[in-house]
Image: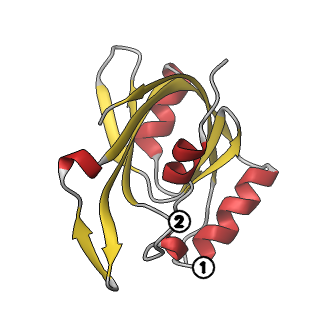
Amino acid sequence: MVELTEEMVKLLSYTYDDRFSEDIPVKVVHLATADKDGKPNVVPISFIKVIDKDKVAIANMTLDKTLKNIQENPKVSIGALDLLKVEENSLKVRIWPEVLGYQFKGTAKIVESSPEVEVLQEIVSKRVPIPVHGAIIVTIEEIYKTS
């Protein structure tokens, strides 16, 4: 079993409410899936929460193709990069040595109702009036540093 480090948790714990905090990275996160034939699909993820030392929950708001792929093939990959930094109340692009990036590979399951879904709905509701239809829970099995 792998465990997320403090650095990884910080990278994956961003929500829109933290967007311009000095302590929270402004990041880009994508979820990659593939259907039963191996055809890939990659989507940006806006709302993600670390729920255990090896698990994350991703809000399902409009992830129809992603959900279909997970039903056919539960293996997924999450790419996360901290590309921007807050400096003097504005965003600055990090130069490569400062960029922090990880790839997390694991197995996903779809849940429609759970405490994690409620937490994600609370986070989403603070920013956008979109209902959360459930969550994708990813158990992380492999971690690779990409920066």
Residue 116 placement (x, y as % from top left): 74, 52
The disc at residue 145 is none
- Label 1 amino acid? Lys
**Which residue is at the front of the view, 41 or 92?**
92
Residue 12 placement (x, y as % from top left): 52, 50
Residue for point 29% across, 36% down: 147
- Label 2 amino acid? Thr
The disc at residue 126 is 1
Label 1: few (<14), some (14–19) or many (≥20) C-alpha neighbours in 10 Å: few
**Which residue is at the front of the view, 62 or 145?**
145
Please say if 127 is above or below 79. Answer: below
Residue 120 placement (x, y as % from top left): 66, 60
Residue at the limit of the structure toward the top, as seen here: 37
Residue holding disc 2: 15
Residue 69 placement (x, y as % from top left): 45, 29
Residue for point 19% across, 47% down: 96
Residue at the limit of the structure toward the bottom, as seen here: 89
114 sits to left or right of 69: right
